Image (cartoon, rainbow, N blue to C red):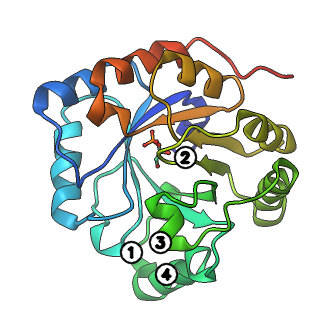
Amino acid sequence: MKSMINTWRHVFKLDPDRTIADEQLEAVCLSGTDAIMIGGSSGITYDNTVDLMSRVRQYELPCVLEVSDLEAVVPGFDLYLIPMVLNAADPSWLIGRHSEAVERYGYLIPWEMVVPEGYLILNADSTAGQVTGADAAMSASRAAAYGQAGERLMSLPVIYVEYSGKFGDMELVAEVKHSLEQARLFYGGGIVDASTAADAAAVSDTVIVGNIIYSDLDKALETVQAVKGTSFQQA
Ligand code: 1GP
């Protein structure tokens, strides 16, 4: 089950705290994307998560939850992705909240469906950047070192370079990618059309597209073809 992430090139991330009409949701789910990730940084509740999951479940593609709030963990997803923020100022975002969750609910956790993600938050102004106090100003070599430490020291299967809301530094992303041997590199942030999607696809394994779904659906749909069929290009 967990290995499904290794085939994903393009993922749409939907936010349970935002409204999407049935027609638009259908277009997203039938777009040819590889999976739907449900998650967000604020306003996530059990009710809005279960509501969105059941709507996405009408379609055949994988639907995974990126857990940001323990109260909003809903059964029925294909996988549970757990962000561990490698560059958070406060270690509670790296492992503290996680260990509290294990202490409280460990006996309920379906570990075979849990995939940890080593997050590198590189847009300090994003909600995730502000909430976690991430130390976002770093050189490409430092970012690559974080990625390698996450992969080699923590055995994380995913390193997620997150610029949420802003298109990132593709040279930095490429350097992180080159530092990894096993972990998959997820890139997200500021993909708004086919061109930004193709640029991100050239330097990462999996491209995550979020905000543009809500502001320009046609542009969001263009990103699928721009990413799929391309492969990561070894520089
Ligand atoms: C956010 O990485 C995702 O968590 C996608 O970013 O919303 O900027 O597309 P955008």
Q: Name the residue under label 2.
A: 2
Residue closer to the observer: 135 or 34: 135
Q: Mark 1 points at which residue?
A: 108
Residue closer to the observer: 67 or 208: 208
Q: Distance between the residues labelled 2 and 1?
A: 18 Å
N-terminal-most mark, 2 or 3: 2
Circles 1, 3 touching at the beta carbon (< 8 Å) = no
Residue closer to the observer: 74 or 11: 11
N-terminal-most mark, 3 or 4: 4
Horizontal side of 218 relative to 66 (left or right) equals left
Say which element carries label 4: helix
Residue lying at 27% horizontally and 62% vertically, measured from the top left: 74
Q: Distance between the residues labelled 1 and 3?
A: 27 Å
Would you call the spot at circle 2 few (<14 residues within 10 Å), some (14-19), or many (20 or more)?
some
Say which element carries label 1: helix
Say which element carries label 2: helix
Circles 3, 4 touching at the beta carbon (< 8 Å) = no
Q: Of tags 3 and 4, which is closer to the observer?
A: 3
N-terminal-most mark, 4 or 1: 4
Question: What amino acid is found at the position of numbered circle 1 in the picture?
Answer: Leu
Q: Of tags 1 and 3, which is closer to the observer?
A: 3
Q: Can residue 30 be seen from the camera position used here?
A: no
Q: How far apart are marks 2 and 4 (CA)?
A: 20 Å
Question: What amino acid is found at the position of numbered circle 3 in the picture?
Answer: Val
Q: Name the residue under label 4.
A: 102
Residue lying at 48% horizontally and 57% vertically, measured from the top left: 126
